[in-house]
Amino acid sequence: QVQLVESGGGLVQAGGSLRLSCSASGRTISSYAMVWFRQAPGKEREFVAGISWGGGSIDIADSVKIQFTISRDNAKNTVYLQMNSLKPEDTAVYYCAARPYSKVILTPDGYASWGQGTQVTVSS
C-alpha cells in the first residue's frame, strides 16, 4: 500500500499562494489516481482536485477551479496542489489520497490510502 505525506501548508494572507506537496512511498504514483481533499472545522471532507492514474484526466472542484491546479511528477513520486489567490474560506486541513488504477472519485470513501494532512490557514 502506498504511504502519503503532505507538506507545504502554513499561514498566508488573503490573496497569497501556497504549493502543497504529497510525497508517496511504497508504490509508484503512476499507478494511482491522486487527489486532494480538504476539511474545515465543523464541515465534511470535500473534494478539491484530482488526477487520474496515467494522468489522462484532471478534475478540479468548481469552487476552486480558477485558483488551484494539480500536477504530478512521477519521477519524484510527488503530487502538487498549487493554490493561488487564497481566500479565508480556503482555510482547512488538506489531505492527499490515492486509489490504484482508477479514475478520480469525488467522494472520500473511494480512497483507502490517506496522508496525515497539512493545515492551511488564510488570514483576512
Image: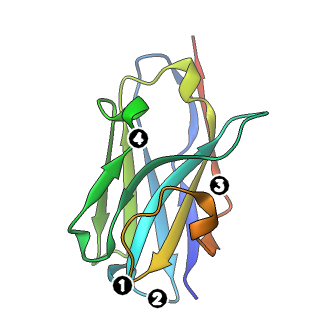
| 121 on left or right of 52 | right
The amino acid type, in three-letter code, at marker 3 is: Gly
Q: Is residue 108 left or right of residue 101?
A: right
Judging depth in this view, the residue of 75 and 70 nearest the camera is: 70
Report how far apart the C-alphas of labels 1 and 4 lie in the structure. Answer: 23 Å
Task: Residue 65 in the image: state x and y as whole percent.
Answer: 32, 35
Q: Nearer the viewer, residue 5 or 105?
A: 105
Q: Is residue 119 left or right of residue 80?
A: right
Residue drawn at 32 percent across, 81 percent down = 30
Q: Nearer the viewer, mark 3 or mark 1?
A: 1
> Which residue is found at the position 57% from the left and 22% from the top?
89
Dot 2 and dot 1 residues touching (CB under 8 Å): yes
**Which marked residue is nearer to the observer: mark 2 or mark 1?**
1
Residue 48 shows which numbered tag? none
Looking at the picture, does residue 23 appear above or below residue 31? above
Q: Residue 86 in the image: x percent, y percent?
A: 44, 24
Q: Image quadrant for the C terminus?
A: top right
Residue pictured at 32% horizontal, 68% vertical: 52
Q: Quadrant of residue 73?
A: bottom left
Residue identifier under label 2: 27
What residue sits 25% from the left and 77% below the top?
Answer: 54
At label 2, the amino acid type is Arg
The mark that comes first in sequence, 3 or 1, is: 1
Q: Which amino acid, by three-letter code, is at mark 1?
A: Ser
* Three-letter amino acid code at the position of disc 4: Ala
- Which circle marks residue 61 in the picture? 4
